[in-house]
Amino acid sequence: MSRHRDGWRLGTRQVRCAGEALEDARRAARAAVGAAVMGLLCAAEAHAAPEPPRAAVRLELVRRAGAEGCPDEGFLSAEVVRRLGADPFRDDAPEVLTVSIAREGPELTASLALRDREGETQWADGFGTSLGCEELLSGVALAIVAQLLGAPERAPPDPGPAPPATALPPPSRRAAPEPPRPALLPPSPSAPPERLRLEAGLGATLGLGITPGAAAGMTLAVGVRRSDWSVALEGRGLVSLAREVEGTLLDTTAFTAAALACYRGGPVFGCGLATVGAVRFTPRDPWTMSPRSDALFGFGARLGAEWPLAGRWSARAYAEATWIVNEAVVMRVAHDSATPAPLYWTSSPLGAAFGLGVTATY
């Protein structure tokens, strides 16, 4: 009986020890799982919010012709900061990021260029949109952020502990360390040149000096444009408003063709031109003189302004002055006493014209 009780106590004690060991094992497993989960969470948190690149550039925004009403540098800077999560711009930074926006016909274009302290271009890009200024600058901000995130950090990393001597290659095979590059962004090809755009214009013209009295008519122009430069060919037809010259009834018309080369700076443009044409005189009393035409040739300059309208359309107004090298002349010589007095008229050595019209850019 005593042995049976001793055996029962021994078995109970063994079962209790086994239960305690099992409970300790469960607690250890829970602690290990918790530690693993906490480690994964910390690692995920560390990878979820990478440190933004330590970069600093000076931002310049240039609004050219047709883009004067677009937002300023503050809008573009805020867009970059919002997307990047940090402010990469400093007024005293040695590198300058220049963003130029302009209107090219129906589109707004942007050109980006990063230059170092010596003025050398380290990176350039360009694109356009027909949506609007804010959409264009939002795209520019995305391009800047993409370059900042994809470029190496400007600041050198903190020096770490030196590696063991056995891990270094032999001195004869080891290359010299490359000095840190000052450029924020890797060099890339220059922005592609802007494409040629076709321009067609139609307008009303008032001419002075080419015909007797003032002349009114129409002007048709066709040309090409790239950036701020353009060349064009113009055809012009004028009808004199004066019906009488020194007591003689005359109908006078003029037809000219001109070649122009123009430069635009904002809404203002200036052109140099060469013109050639003919002036035709038609008498109303054919018994006194016969119809005749006389050629003219001249050089001149034009100054005007252009304002964008809806879409590809724009309005323009201009004034021009022309030096007429070969002027038009009409003359009647008396043959007998029945013929009226001699008639003589010549065009002025300096002609002028004023125009108002519309232009479409394709």
Image (cartoon, rainbow, N blue to C red):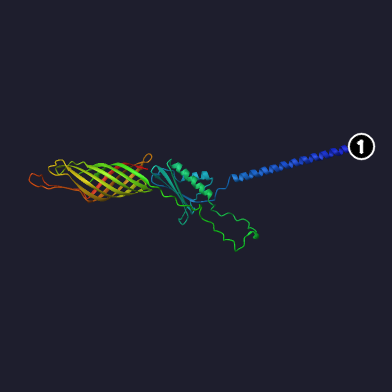
Q: Secondary structure at mark 1?
A: helix
Rendered location of residue 275, percent (x, y) = 26, 49
- Left or right placement of residue 252 versus residue 101 in this view: left
Residue position for label 1: 2
Q: Quadrant of residue 238?
A: top left
Which sits in the foreground, 66 or 124?
Answer: 124
| Image: 112 above or below 164 | above
Please tell me which residue is depicted at 79% across the width and 40% down the height of the picture.
Answer: 20
Please tell me which residue is depicted at 64% across the width and 44% down the height of the picture.
Answer: 42
The image quadrant where one finds the N terminus is top right
- Left or right placement of residue 146 versus residue 334 in this view: right
Farthest residue to the right: give it: 1
Rendered location of residue 200, percent (x, y) = 33, 43
- Left or right placement of residue 192 versus residue 146 in this view: left
Res 126 visible = yes
Please tell me which residue is depicted at 65% across the width and 60% down the height of the picture.
Answer: 166
Please tell me which residue is depicted at 35% across the width and 44% down the height of the picture.
Answer: 199
- Left or right placement of residue 227 versus residue 21 in this view: left
Res 209 visible = no
| Image: 174 above or below 234 | below
Rendered location of residue 233, percent (x, y) = 30, 47
Farthest residue to the top: give it: 1
The image quadrant where one finds the C terminus is top left
